Image (cartoon, rainbow, N blue to C red):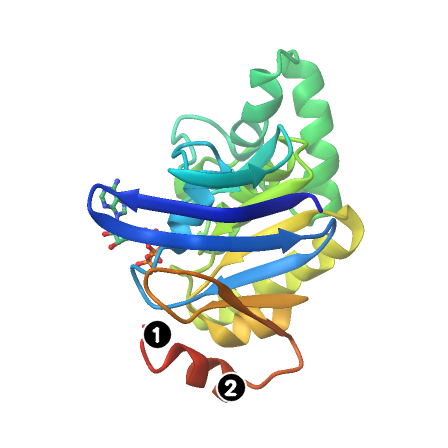
Amino acid sequence: MVVAMEDVYFSYNEKVILSGLNLHIKAEEFISIVGASGCGKSTVFRLLLGLEQPQQGVIKKPGKIGYMPQQHQLMPWRTALDNAIVPLECQGIKKKEARRQAQQFFIRFGLADYEDKKPHELSGGMQQRVSFIRTLLTGADVLLLDEPFSALDALTRKDLQQWLKDIVKVEKKTILFITHDIDEALFLSNRIFVATTQPIAAFECMDSSVSKQQIYAKIGGAMV
Ligand SMILES: Nc1ncnc2c1ncn2[C@@H]1O[C@H](COP(=O)(O)OP(=O)(O)OP(=O)(O)O)[C@@H](O)[C@H]1O
């Protein structure tokens, strides 16, 4: 197990979000988390990132976890390449060497022509690609992606899904992916964690052979 939660309880003040949650994730799994808006999906990420502490229970996770937010949060004054190197700079790697390492990712993942562009010169899809490469450059084996494609138009979103799937095949990461798009979850994931109750006492775990309708039925139409 690379990530596990055992009997985790968590509340914001009086509002109970997690009520005895157990989850176990193996290395190199791609897990999507789906559920009604406000059910507590991002809270699971906040706990894994150590931004919140459980009131009860145990969380097992590696020391380093990469996080990709919904909004790219690229620095507007930096080029795409210099945005991507931020995690390397944070590790004390000199800019020249950091750029050299990041360039390999830009070349391998089809972004070579975009290295010198500022974020505002990039399409939404390209901004998200740069943001994902920045997350990869943390060097973490576990990546948390929080609705990374939700602001993209349908065609760009499909491109990014295929792009991500191709990368994951070679990069061997363990990925937790929050989405509101069941087709996206089915396309990308080995397993889908469906939040069926509030507070979340357990995720219903489904593999990608289930139908969209079966997942909707579990959520009970509460999905946005
Ligand atoms: N810092 C906070 N203090 C108090 N309540 C919070 C805080 N953060 C989130 N909440 C509440 O906790 C609940 C779960 O929030 P969370 O963001 O985890 O849900 P979510 O499933 O990720 O939602 P969405 O799908 O809309 O992004 C929501 O009702 C939210 O309003």
Q: Quadrant of the C terminus?
A: bottom left
Tell which of 63 and 19 is nearer to you: 19
Residue 70 seen: no
Residue 181 shown left or right of residue 130 in the figure? left
Identify the disc placed on residue 3.
none
Residue plotted at (65% across, 65% down): 162
In this rendering, the answer to whether 138 lies above or below 71 is above
What amino acid is labelled 1 in the image? Met
> Badge 2: few (under 14), some or many (20 or more) residues near its Cα, within 10 Å?
few
Q: Residue furthest left?
A: 14
Residue plotted at (66% across, 23% down): 99
At mark 2, the secondary structure is helix
Residue 72: x and y in percent read: 43, 43
Quarter of the image holding residue 186?
A: bottom right
What amino acid is labelled 2 in the image? Gln
Which residue is disc 2 drawn over? Answer: 214
Q: Decide: marks 1, 2 in contact (CB < 8 A)?
A: no
Tell which of 189 and 164 is nearer to you: 189
Residue 13: x and y in percent read: 21, 41
In this rendering, the answer to whether 209 lies above or below 48 is below
In this rendering, the answer to whether 200 lies above or below 102 is below
Residue 217: x and y in percent read: 43, 85
Residue 129: x and y in percent read: 56, 48
Residue 36 seen: yes
Which residue is disc 1 drawn over? Answer: 223
Quarter of the image holding residue 47?
A: top left
